[in-house]
Every structure is written in structure tokens, then in C-alpha cells.
Image (cartoon, rainbow, N blue to C red):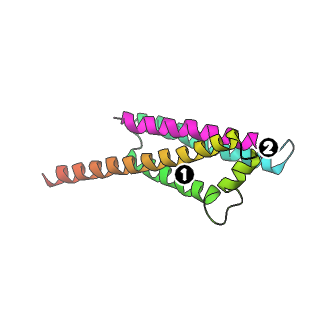
Amino acid sequence: MANHKLLGLVATATLLSSAHMVDHAIRDELPRWPAEDLATFAVVNLVLFGALGTGIYLYVRGKVGPRFWTLFSFTGVLLGWASHFSPFTDQPVSYILGAYDYGVGGWLAVAVLLALMLVMTTAGVYAASLWRRKVRMQRRMEGA
């Protein structure tokens, strides 16, 4: 049975991820047709949101469990960190703010990004606790 708190965290992360993708498009990072970068942007979005949709479907059907969301969430956190917070990124927070001339839009975009990272981290930790609880219950059943 699907955990509704975990589903809520995943749904919130999906909405925040959508808002972050809109931010990328607003900052005029979405290239115009025809461009190789446009195809890359489209493929990344198809893979990301396709995986989210498929994951939610499979989770509700009981085909995947909290382990899937633990790995998915922490992979997202790692990619988000590498894309916007690592010392090697070309799109740090200052870049996002600068794209909006350090105005309200930039601060909103950064707030969405930070909220996304926080929700994904929370989802990952929560999913890991559910996964651990499930493993403990299975061990108890095997030992009984």
C-alpha cells in the first residue's frame, strides 16, 4: 500500500521541478528551433517527468517501494547540487539571480530551487526510513 505522505512529497517535488523547468525557459535558456540544445532540454524533461509518472504509477500499484524513491530522490539531489551548487557549475545561484537582474523573479526562482532541493532531501530521508522499516519487518517475519 502506498504511503500518502511519501506520495505527497513526490507530488510536491514534481510541481517544484516543473516550476524550475519553467524558470529555465523564462531565463531564455530554452533554445529556439532548430537547435541541438532544444532537443537535449526536451529529452531531459521527457526522461525526468516520464520517470516520475512511471514511478508514481508503479508505486501506487505496489510494483516499486520506498527503495525506488530513496534512490530517485537522492539522485535528484545529487544532480541538483551538481547543476547549481557545486563549484564546477556554470549556473550557480548568482547566475540565476543575475538573469533576473537580482529582482523578485530571481529570488523566486532561487526559492523554488531551494524548496525543490529541500523537498527531495526530505522525500529521500523519509523513503529511506520506510525502506528500513520494511526491511526490519521482513527480517522479523523470516525469524519468526
Give whichever of 36, 10 is nearer the camera: 10
Return the disc, 1 or 2, that comes first in the chain's sequence. Answer: 2
Label 1 with label 2: CB-CB less than 8 Å = no
Q: Residue at x 28, y 52 (%)?
A: 135
**Residue 42, image x and y in percent?**
72, 43
Mark 1: secondary structure: helix
Please state the total of marks drawn on the protein image.
2
Left or right, 143 with respect to 56, comes to left
Left or right, 49 with respect to 60, comes to right
Residue 46 appears in the figure:
no
Which circle marks residue 12 in the picture? Answer: none
Tag 2: amino acid: Asp
Q: Please say whether residue 120 is one of the residues in the magenta stretch.
A: no
Q: Residue at x 49, y 41 (%)?
A: 55
Is residue 75 shown above or below 33?
below
The boundaries of the magenta stretch are 1-30
Q: Residue at x 53, y 49 (%)?
A: 117
1 vs 2, front mark: 2
Q: Please say whether residue 14 is one of the residues in the magenta stretch.
A: yes
Give whichever of 28, 99 is nearer the camera: 99
Give whichever of 105, 143 is nearer the camera: 105
Q: Residue at x 38, y 36 (%)?
A: 5
Residue annotated with mark 2 = 28
Left or right, 39 with respect to 57, comes to right
**Within the image, what quadrant is residue 60 found in?**
top left
Residue annotated with mark 1 = 76
Tag 1: amino acid: Gly
Q: How many neighbours does mark 2 have within 10 angstroms: few (below 14), some (14-19), or many (20 or more)?
A: few
CA gap between label 1 and label 2 equals 23 Å
Q: Residue furthest right?
A: 34
**Residue 131, image x and y in percent?**
34, 49
Which secondary structure is most common in the magenta stretch? helix
